Amino acid sequence: MFKNLLIVSLILVSVIIVLRTLTLSVRSDNLRPCRSSDADFIPASDTVLSRFQQALRFRTVSIEPFNYNREELKKFNNFINEAFPLLHSSSFIKHEVIGNFSRLYTVRGTNTSLTPYMLCSHLDVVPAEPSRWDVDPFGGEIRGDYIYGRGTIDDKHGVMGILEAMEFLLSKGFQPQRSFYIAFGHDEEVNGADGARVISETLYQRGVRRLEFLLDEGLTVTQGIFPGTDTPVALIGTSEKGYINVQLKVKGEVGHSSMPKKETAITVLARAISKLEGHPHPSMFGYGPELDMFQHMASKLKPLHRAVMSNLWLFSPLVSWMLSWKPETNAIVKTVTSVTMVHGGVKINVLPPEAVAMVNHRVHPAQTVKEVVDYDRRLINDDRVEVTVLDSMEPLPMSPYGDEDFGYQTIKNSIQQIWTTAAVTPGVMIGNTDTKHYTRFTENIYRFSPSFMHPNDLKRFHGDNERISIKNYEQAINFFYHVIINANEEKLLPYHKHGEEL
């Protein structure tokens, strides 16, 4: 009897696996691809490339909160005013400098019943060490098919891509029916306190209470990173990890090294650190968008991988375990822990009076700051170790990405018009942006950068020899063009689902 029941159960599970593998699908609209032969295609002409190169030459470096290169930001702002004359002379576009260096554009549409949206990017960049680069990091040099420079992928291609798309649209006599905002903060790399926060306050004081959606920098188009597919995968960040900076401190007794205590402050601290790194936080696979991320790319996977990803109701423990192998994928499914600084001791023959370690957590959207700190304390389980939270940010709320969610589907369709073979999926933004300052306006916050990344490109982000291909920069401009055009619709086109006629 038991044997027969087992056989029937296995057959039933097999049938479910096969059916879901063959039928699982997500919304896919009939889209017109962006082609270089189109009348509305924006080519990366010599003039367009020259403007981008010039933008990269401004050393708009942010060092820490309230410490950024004001003179270079001023020069960059002046350049933008001069380089895009139609944008800055349009009768229906208000442009202004906010917080001394950030920029806000209000593009007035003809249909005031439609809720506005917002496009965001930022003017500042992280520092660069010239001795580690093959080119001048602020030279905007073109070598072969690539443009090199700090900001090429974070995030001046976003700033200039939006501006180029707008200038092109205005040259064709475009005026939208849906109003929208363009916001460029000047200190995103150091949390946006003087930039995005002030823009947010300005809009709120003017009575803005609702945005249809917000698009900011974020995840990218990747290839060769996810197993089971050779096609590009475009990730839209629908949630953003929080962070916690924690200090661990142990006080010790000073004495001569010739008469050591059983444990020194450094020994106690080392044991605490070992516990944190040896017992990582549990996988949260399935509690954020990561489960849907794999299901949305299932149709682009090879047969075996497709069967697994289409049936995560059964295989999610296996997938979660496999994702924990690599740092890049482990960060998607867990709160991660990095011990980044350690100090202790004053002299080689003196017992240390104290030992201190700094720990950075990136908090999964399904957890809270308190839960993570409580986990640390339980794990360390030693009253001699003082655990102090220096600063923190809760994970940002998860944004919707369903078949009828206007913002997500608008961005998704715009991506697929540029990267026509890509699987577009929701994802977890493992870094941080300044979108936290705009959460009062909308729950529809999406983080996507129109950058094309191979595995060996990832180290260039905030790293050495940052670059973008000329083709990719052209794609970025046309992506923003399509976002503006697609967002100008009153609503999504009706979605015809297979099986509706049954």
Image: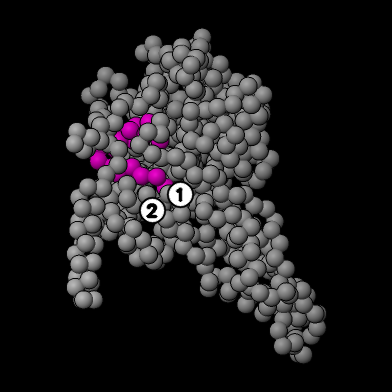
Q: Which residue is mark 1?
A: 428
Left of 369 or right of it: where is 212?
Answer: left
Q: Residue at x 41, y 52 (%)?
A: 290
In percent of width and height, residue 412 lies at: 35, 36
Considering depth in this image, is 28 or 244 the residue closer to the camera? Answer: 28
Q: Residue at x 68, y 63 (%)?
A: 247
Look at the picture and state if 180 lies above or below 257.
above
Residue 221, quarter of the rendered image: top left
Magenta residues, as a range? Answer: 408-427
Q: Callout 2, which amino acid?
A: Leu
- Count numbered badges in the picture: 2
In percent of width and height, residue 421 lies at: 25, 41
Q: Residue at x 34, y 52 (%)?
A: 294
Q: Secondary structure at mark 1?
A: strand
In percent of width and height, residue 362 lies at: 55, 56
Q: Residue at x 67, y 79 (%)?
A: 267
Q: Which class describes the residues within 10 Å of circle 2: few (<14), some (14-19), or many (20+)?
A: many
Q: Is residue 139 visible?
A: no
